Amino acid sequence: MLDNFFHAQSIAVVGASRSPGKVGYDILKNIIQYGFDGSVYPINPGAPEILGKKAYPSLMDVPGEIDVAVIVVPSKNVLEIIDQCGTRKIDSAIIITAGFKESGIEGSKLELELIRRAKQAGVRFIGPNCLGVIDTHSKINASFAAGMPAKGSIGFFSQSGALCLAVLDRALPDEIGFSKFISMGNKADITDMDIMLALAEDDNTKVILGYIEGVSDGRKFMEVAREVSRKKPIIILKSGITASGAKAASSHTGALAGREAAFDAAFKQSGIIRAHTLNELFNFALAFANQPVPRGPNAAIITNSGGPGILAADACDKSNLQLIPLHKEYVDELRTFLPPVASFYNPIDILGDSGAERYEKTLNTVIKDERINSIMVLLTPTAVVDVEATARAVINVARLIDRPILTSFMGKKSVEAGARILMKHGVPNYSYPEEMVSSLNAMYRYHLWLHKPEKNFPVYEGYREKAAQIFEKVKRDKRDRLHELEVHDVLQAYGFSQPKSLFVRTPEEALAAAKGIGFPVVMKIVSPQISHKSDIGGVKINLNSKKEVENAFFEITTRVRNILPSAHIAGVLVQEMVPKGREVIMGITSDPQFGHMIMFGLGGIYVEVLKDVSFRIAPLSREDAYEMIRETKAFPLLRGVRGETEADIEAIEKSLLVLSNIASDFPHIIEADINPLLVRNRGEGVVAIDARFTIGGN
């Protein structure tokens, strides 16, 4: 579908200019200057020729076939050019021109008309408001960038033209090679999804890089990324991570969710490697483009200095990588040529007086241990070390193995020549040990993604019809929140265990309910206007007598009337006092781009303060639920500390999956919390102590 953009035999520049500095001039110059060997047609009604090429008044006057039209005319004229493309059977266009949806309401209207006219004309286009397209292997530079990247295996796409220029400027001096360089602009037609699919099939592209600000169809984006990431690594830098939506969320889940949480979850579930900075984007790209992916977590560090070795080891500790000691026979081999005061384990410190020969002998010994999946080589530029010779020694060993070798030749001026040698021969070098470890860790995480088993999506039907009746009643009543008893019935329909509960309207009914349930009891206000009952004193716990129950009923109802006089008090819920357990929270929230997200975290009243939560896009697989629980810092508490019995983690996993099913069954749920979900000991299950649901839409 994008073949013409990268393998064009003829290109027309509509709006080509004779004036240096004009975009129409720079694009034409780049096409000619960087070796495009097809036909080039400048289109300018006022010029007989430009840059030695015969110019034509319009596309209609060009005698030969045209594969791609690069459009650089004012926005008001773009529609006419698209119509001409349709007439000339030109099915591919790059619209450089700005002045569309990025410029306001009128520009948005113009862009919608552009989409309609292009579809009618049978034209697929990149842009508008873009920098252009570069293919180094086809020698196409249909952009107004100042320079042509070196030929390589990194495919890059970006929603921002300015970022394209920054990336190119960063790549040129270090001769970082790209296969394709695509500025998407407004993504009015061809999107990041189209480009990812094209790069996945491109033989010249080994790793896919992208910069995005948003996606138009989150679900489709995940589907495409999941397919592509099984073929090639996708590394994306995402900007605009502020909380989504202007409304104040009524649930903990809604308050904690945001664009960053949604994209982070989507990336994890799609196999996308997320870069958080431009520097990280480059670091990861260099590793993937030049070295094989490690087949396991075991890494070895070789260093001529203890401090940097410790920094690298610390970084490994915070990653998925593991530092294991070499097998005894290889340690013994190291002892035959390393000084006695060297460190023979991992990191392997070969000392500051090491030369290239010592590095090479150490590397040759380390690679004999087949348990080592990757190697990191650190060098600080001491007076005795020959940096360039050491770089060549690393390259000699790297050629022998199909395991990744990454380096950190630390410093700038003293290691510059050595770093250049390493990069030229496909061994990525990093200025700092932490960058090296982070890049290797990204590669190993990609290995884990490639070897993940097929996802299992269990279905817990429950009594969907009963829950549907409750939601329908709430909609008929024109309410957006479920009453306490309605929430109870929805959870009960899906099999959640809950405390014994009775709804009462008077102190006398409350006392009778407490006696029926058995002391101690809990009492909670029931009001459709109140979500967080404890915030306004609407909850009383551990009530052990007739007097305490009667007083609690009076205190709760009076306090709520004083604080929220407009709230309708339906009554009070009397519940059994469930024995203590570990408290967790799980919930549903709706993201505008990805749909329902499921949240899990440490429960109770401090969840929004501690923010120890994880998110996934629904529906959840068993693997998603498993990972969500283990991502939280509170997970060790569930495993049990200081002799505690392990919590029923399997019951938490099942509860997350059931909640995901509820979200799928009822798309109009906006927010929901089960907080706290009381987790008993292993094998004893969980109890939903409190919950809330907010719905909307049709």
Image (tube, rainbow, N blue to C red):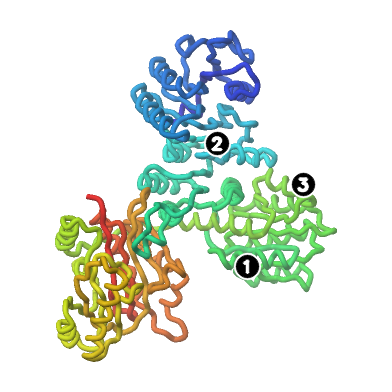
Q: Residues within 10 Å of mark 2 (few under 14, many from 20)?
A: some
Q: Is residue 442 left or right of residue 394?
A: left
Q: Nearer the viewer, residue 391 or 675?
A: 675
Label of residue 667 in the image = none
- Gap in angstroms between the C-alphas marked 3 and 1: 28 Å
**What is the tally of numbered marks visible in this picture?**
3
The location of residue 126, given as percent across then percent down, is 46, 31
Q: Name the disc covering residue 161, or none.
A: 2
Residue 410 in the image: state x and y as whole percent: 73, 56
Q: Amino acid at mark 1?
A: Asp
Secondary element type, mark 3? helix
Q: Which mark's residue is nearer the viewer, 3 or 1? A: 1
Between 599 and 325, the one lying in front of the other is 599
- Is 262 on the left or on the right of 680, as rendered? right
At label 2, the amino acid type is Gly
Q: Which mark is residue 417?
A: 3
The crowd level at tag 1 (other Cα within 10 Å; few <14, some 14-19, many 20+) is some
Pointer 1 residue: 314
Distance from disc 1 to disc 2, alpha carbons, whole Å, reads: 38 Å
> Disc 1 vs disc 2: Cβ atoms closer than 8 Å?
no
